[in-house]
Image (spheres, rainbow, N blue to C red):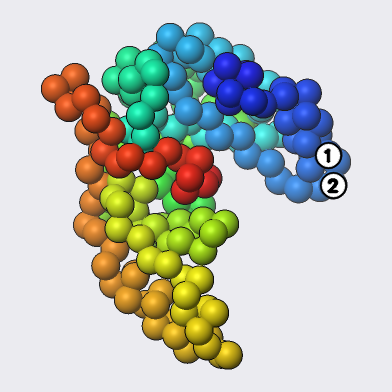
Amino acid sequence: FRKITRWGDLDKVLGGIEAARKAGMRVKINAVALKGVNEDEIESLMVWAHGLGMDLTLIEVMPLGEIEPGRIDQFLPLSVVRARLMDRYNLVEDAYRTGGPARYVRVQETGGLIGFIMPLTHNFCESCNRVRLTCTGTLYMCLGQEDAADLRAPLRASSDDALLHQAMEEAIARKPKGHDFVIDRRRAKPAVGRHMSVTGG
């Protein structure tokens, strides 16, 4: 856990999850599937999450920011993960949707849901309605593009929200039709230079 997160304290994270559950919050666990890193832990992660009444969403690694080792070495298609799970579990398509890109199945043996977010093996750009606002007021219209809008300047330049609304509408109008995510040994550089931690989850 510490190696993947570079700083994380697993006990603190587990304590936070437990506190959220005790407070009555519905908790969902997100995990990026990483070849050679956590691929042998996905089943046990699912059993743990479902055993506590939490859903699990798996995400394919995305080519964001330079890292060592490269993303190509970490890429694990979720079609492979799903096939491996189907060797031991009955996965039933489920109509549950959050408005995001995940597609869900219910695991009959556990009763829980698993979501699959597959930006590389099952592009979902045509139905994407997401933008991301960073804690510094930068609005990204797509994770896989560099285009962004600074919302701090219009917010600070007006006593009402008119300039802010205008900036947001102009930014949304520029939302691209798709990302440039490609994981390929011939393309060594990431699709965008910023790391996911810059944009935020």
Asked whether the viewer can see residue 150, the reply is yes
Given the current orientation, which residue lies at the most extreme left position? 186
- The residue under label 1 is 19
Within the image, what quadrant is residue 55 found in?
A: top right
- Kindly identify the amino acid type of the residue bearing the numbered disc 1: Ala
Above or below 198: residue 40: above
Numbered disc 1: secondary structure = helix
6 or 130, which lies in front? 6
Q: Residue at x 33, y 15 (%)?
A: 73
Q: Disc 1 versus disc 2: distance between alpha carbons?
A: 6 Å
- Marks 1 and 2 in Cβ contact (< 8 Å): yes
Question: Can you identify the residue that label 2 sits on?
Answer: 23
| Residue drawn at 55 percent across, 21 percent down | 4
Decide: few, some or many residues near mark 1? Use Cα within 10 Å; few <14, some 14-19, many ≥20.
few
Amino acid type indicated by mark 2:
Ala
Q: Is residue 21 above or below residue 153?
A: above
